[in-house]
Each structure stands twice: as structure tokens, then as C-alpha cells.
Image (cartoon, rainbow, N blue to C red):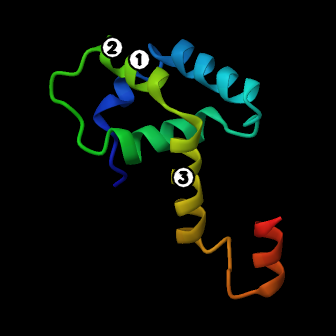
Amino acid sequence: MEHVHKYEAFRDDVRPAMKSKLEEFEMFGYGSITEKELWGFLVNKKWKKPKEDARVYEIVADILAVQPGEYMNYATVEAFKLGSMNLSDEEERNELLK
């Protein structure tokens, strides 16, 4: 059975904040991030230990506080975990260093 995060109940309520954050990322040149990816970052990193009495405004504040570099660090680590980057391949290392 798949675990449902405690804040999933707020997802529809905070969708405008998610959209705003994604628009901000796009404005800074990070246009390929999806709502699902951003939500995954929040659930797996920012909200790893959810508060029992969390309020919508706190969740919105967390969403709006996400920095592009913070998300990109998370995405990079996740890519390494999934094995989509192989630094033992010299060609891939050179592509990464460009």
C-alpha cells in the first residue's frame, strides 16, 4: 500500500502557490520543472517530518520559500540515486562539466 503524505489533503488548496512558484522558476530559466516534481521535493525533503497541526498558510509559505538552487540540488541527488547519471563514463563527465 502506498503511503499518502499528511499534506496531500492540502494539495488542491495550495495549487495557486505551486503555480506561482513554477512560474517563478520558469522566469529564472528553470522551465522544465513540473508541479509533480516540485510537490515531490516538498514531500521528500522540506516536509519529511510533517507537523501534526499544519495550517494552509504554513504550507503555502513553505512552497513560496523554495529556492531554485535548493530544488536543483535535490533533483541532482535524486538523478544520481536513480542512476541516470554515470560519472564513470568520460563522455558524460565532460558533458556535465561544459
Q: Nearer the viewer, residue 69 or 44?
A: 69
Rate crowding at label 2 as few (under 14), some (14 to 19) or many (20 or more) other CA atoms within 10 Å. Answer: some
Helix, strand or loop at mark 2:
helix
Task: Please name the residue that numbered disc 2 is placed on.
Answer: 56
Residue appearing at x 39%, y 18% in the figure: 61
Q: Which residue is mark 3?
A: 73
Q: From the viewer's perspective, is 74 left or right of 88?
A: left
Q: Is residue 19 left or right of residue 70?
A: right
User: Type of residue at label 3?
Assistant: Asn
Which of the numbered marks, if any, corresponds to residue 60? 1
Q: Quadrant of the N terminus?
A: bottom left
Going by the numbered disc 2, the residue's amino acid type is Val
The answer to whether residue 70 is left or right of residue 29 is: left
Residue 65 x, y percent position in the rendering: 45, 25
Q: CA distance from mark 2 to mark 1?
A: 6 Å
Give the mark nearer the N terminus: 3 vs 2.
2
Q: How crowded is the residue under tag 3: few (<14 C-alpha within 10 Å), some, or many (20+)?
A: few
Of all residues shown, which one is farthest toward the front?
A: 98
User: Which quadrant would residue 9 be assigned to in this image?
Assistant: top left
